[in-house]
Image: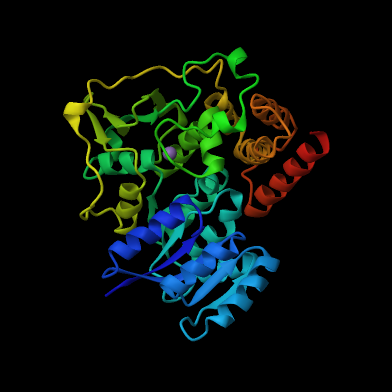
Amino acid sequence: MKRNLVILGSTGSIGTQTLEIVKDKNEDFAVLALAAYSNVNLMLSQIIEFNPDYAVLYDKDAAFELEKLVKEHSAEVNTSVLSGMDGLEFISTLKECDMVVAAMVGMIGIRPTIAAVKAGKNIALANKETLVTAGHIIVPLCKENNVTLYPVDSEHSAIYQCLKAQDPCMIDKILLTASGGPFLGRKYDDLKDVSLEDALKHPNWSMGKKITIDSASLVNKGLEVIEARWLFDVKIEDVEVVVHPESIIHSMVQFKDNAILAQLGLPDMKLPIQYALYEGNRRTMPERKVDLFSLSKLDFLKPDHETFKGIRLAVDSYRRGYIYTTVFNASNEMANRFFQEGRIKFLQIYDIIEDALSLDFDHCRIPSLDEILNTEQEVYKYISSKY
Ligand code: MN
């Protein structure tokens, strides 16, 4: 029987690659619902190709436009168009849904992911911001509802693969690899005038804009450290970042007997996506393979925390109290957007995050979902009034 997928963020980088896998493995998967932020044209072509029962555009005007266009195609498709957070939560809890692919960018993914977990849906998780800011809510909720989170992030998929059939008590540390991004080797002063174009030139991975900039600042790696802490129930101190410029080793686990297991592959999201869609099972993959003989060597370096503050700021925010992971993430989301819009320089991304982290929040409390979302808004308001 085919498994029904609900794909949140279907027009983004992970979403479109997920649909390519669905097309390739159409004997195993059907698309029940698709959701995106506002991309009408791409959503329309996905609807025509996959004929889902539902399509959601978060942006209400875009959804209105999409609905008109879908009606013109009513001979080929019978898709209902929805909008807003209600629409996202509705499709994430559909009775016929077997798995939710959470691939939207940013904290907008929190509510639909929580709704899906409460409805007992397994999740293929690409939306790291959700786990970073609400991991303390989502992880226990998953246990309660017997839900598994299958990581789509390449590093976390690698760790998940390395931990298969291993005793979690024997983990010594997680070795989270980082390519170092386009600015690897540069010093703080060299980054003063880098352009958006420079930041978007990732040496190995082809990804969406937000995450590519986060990779250049190493904020992405900081988010991934916290993501790993939640996904694998380890202490944040036990996640060590190893810069590995070739991006062939996607991450490693060191065990208490000093054995290290690694997962290798080309930098291609197809494998982690497919592995998650099959709930941690292997299937064939037609793409290119690693040619070990063409790799003369693999390099490993310590991260330069003086230049790239992304990891340290993330870990500090986590240590100060869970609410500060929201402050860290929300301030980065806004700084990232401002950098894309040309409103700030690259290094100001760090200034904005540090500024937001200096605000006073109740660090002792374990924040509820509402407190997380309110704090997010407060941070946005504070930053937009200042920059
Ligand atoms: Mn990653």
Q: Is residue 116 visible?
A: yes
Quadrant where the image shows the C terminus: top right
- Viewer-proximal residue, 271 or 342? 342
Locate residue 4 relative to residue 81 in the image: left or right: left
Locate residue 360 relative to residue 158 in the image: left or right: right
- Against 16, residue 135 (above or below) is above
The quadrant where ligand 1 appears is: top left
Q: Residue at x 48, y 77 (%)?
A: 53
Q: Residue at x 48, y 86 (%)?
A: 75
The location of residue 325, given as percent across then percent down, is 60, 38
Quadrant where the image shows the N terminus: bottom left
- Against 227, residue 93 (above or below) is below
- Viewer-proximal residue, 243 or 44? 44
Q: Residue at x 33, y 49 (%)?
A: 270
The residue sitting at the right extreme is 385
- Viewer-proximal residue, 268 or 70? 70
Locate residue 302 relative to residue 265 in the image: left or right: right
